[in-house]
Amino acid sequence: GENVEQHPSTLSVQEGDSAVIKCTYSDSASNYFPWYKQELGKGPQLIIDIRSNVGEKKDQRIAVTLNKTAKHFSLHITETQPEDSAVYFCAANAAGNKLTFGGGTRVLVKP
Amino acid sequence: DSGVTQTPKHLITATGQRVTLRCSPRSGDLSVYWYQQSLDQGLQFLIQYYNGEERAKGNILERFSAQQFPDLHSELNLSSLELGDSALYFCASSITVRDEKLFFGSGTQLSVL
């Protein structure tokens, strides 16, 4: 089955700096890659997703890049703000398969 | 607010007991998923229902069962509870049968003492 590894497990950045979270996946058939943000006491919330026919997708301060050859994808947050502090999860799945989540990255934005 | 409602928010019970967790999906969503989140295991998929039928099973213990009712709400039943069952249980819903654009509820925190 699919295996998704996520790094780093914790990330501390200064407000205004950029944050990058990286994930690798094992199943070359995977074609859907969402990112979820989980704030304290809440459930994960979908913030951006990308499909394998696209190399990059951007939504305001958030961008995701995908390298199918290397089987890795990354989340980039620019101009970080205190409200970006949360746990971020990457995930991957191939059509007909179940979504597999990475272990999560705890991001702390220091004011 | 994701539109997915889970009750109760917190549940404290003793080993050997049985509990029921309830989930109402977003209006119009036909798929309901149950996930378990513990500190050392991340988000683990338990089971999926689509329009009342079981669609997929993950790492769900035999002591656990679920169902989706005609009005599309779902219940997760946990029996013969053990200390290790203490975790956050999330329900998620989506409009399709595929695992895409899942919307998660706020979860039920289960503590087994």
Image (spheres, helix red, strand yellow):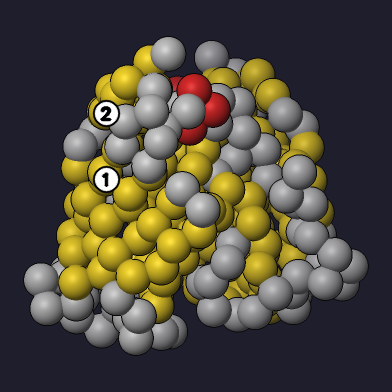
Which quadrant of the rendered structure holds the N terminus of chain A? bottom left
Amino acid, disc 1: Ile
Front residue of B38 and B63: B38
Residue B81 in the image: state x and y as whole percent. 54, 32
Give the left or right position of residue A72, taking residue B45 as reference. left
Residue B17 in the image: state x and y as whole percent. 63, 29
Numbered disc 1: what chain? A
Crowding at label 2, few (<14), some or many (≥20) Cα neighbours within 10 Å? some
Residue B87 visible here: no
Do the numbered discs 2 and 1 sit on residues whose CB atoms are within 8 Å?
Answer: yes
Q: Is residue B35 above or below residue B98?
A: above
Regarding mark 1 in the picture, which secondary structure is present there? strand
Give the left or right position of residue A65, taking residue A60 as reference. left
Residue B78 in the image: state x and y as whole percent. 60, 42
Which quadrant of the rendered structure holds the C terminus of chain A? top left
In the image, which disc is placed on residue A37?
Answer: none
Give the left or right position of residue B78, taking residue A35 as reference. right
Quadrant of the rendered image containing residue A14: top left
Q: Residue at x 70, y 74 (%)?
A: B95
Q: Is residue B37 above or below residue B2?
A: above
Amino acid, disc 2: Leu
Q: Is residue B54 above or below residue A63?
A: below
Distance of mark 2 from mark 1, alpha carbons? Answer: 8 Å
Write down the residue under mark 1: A21
Labels 2 and 1: the sequence-earlier one:
2
In the image, which disc is placed on residue A11?
Answer: 2
User: Same subunit under labels 2 and 1?
Assistant: yes
